[in-house]
Amino acid sequence: MATETIRKNSISKYLSTLKECWFMKVLGTVRGRTGVPDIICVYKGTPIFLEVKTDKGTASPKQLIEIDKLRKAKAIVEIVRTRDDVKRIIEKVERGK
């Protein structure tokens, strides 16, 4: 089973191949805001926040609070497990444009 780090790296490699895409991996720090999704992405003007989990991983209560706040702000926020999950989100954004 791939760790979250391996999955984040795989997703980052995919996002780096997309034109009109900016992204960054959020690094957890003592002073940082807890619960923020792992990857922040803007694809063709659409904000996308990705919380990366392993097959058995679940979002923490703090993560669920941040996800709810971001969705209320009209951002796309998804819990993803694979690069294919992210590809489906990008395809959905493409269809919506």
Image (cartoon, rainbow, N blue to C red):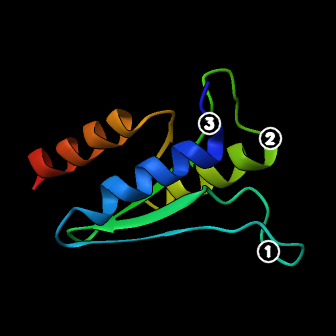
Q: Which residue is mark 3?
A: 53
> Is residue 19 found left or right of 77 in the rendered image?
left
Dots 3 and 1: beta carbons under 8 Å?
no
Residue that lies at the very extreme toward the bottom in this rendered image: 31
Q: Which residue is mark 2?
A: 61
* Res. 75 visible in picture: no
Q: Is residue 48 above or below residue 11?
A: below
User: Is the C terminus in the top left, top right, bottom left or bottom right quadrant?
Assistant: bottom left
Where residue 21 appears, as percent x and y from the top left, is 27, 70
Q: Residues within 10 Å of mark 1 (few under 14, many from 20)?
A: few
Instruction: Compare marks 1 and 2 and give the one earlier in the sequence.
Output: 1
Q: Foreground: 69 or 41?
A: 41
Where residue 44 appears, as percent x and y from the top left, is 20, 68
Q: Foreground: 67 or 31?
A: 31
Q: Which residue is mark 1?
A: 32
Quarter location, residue 55: top right
Residue type pointed to by label 3: Lys
Residue 86, disc: none
* Secondary element at image label 2: helix
- The structure residue drawn at horizontal position 67% and vertical position 55%, both measured from the top left corner, is 66
User: Is the N terminus in the top left, top right, bottom left or bottom right quadrant?
Assistant: top right
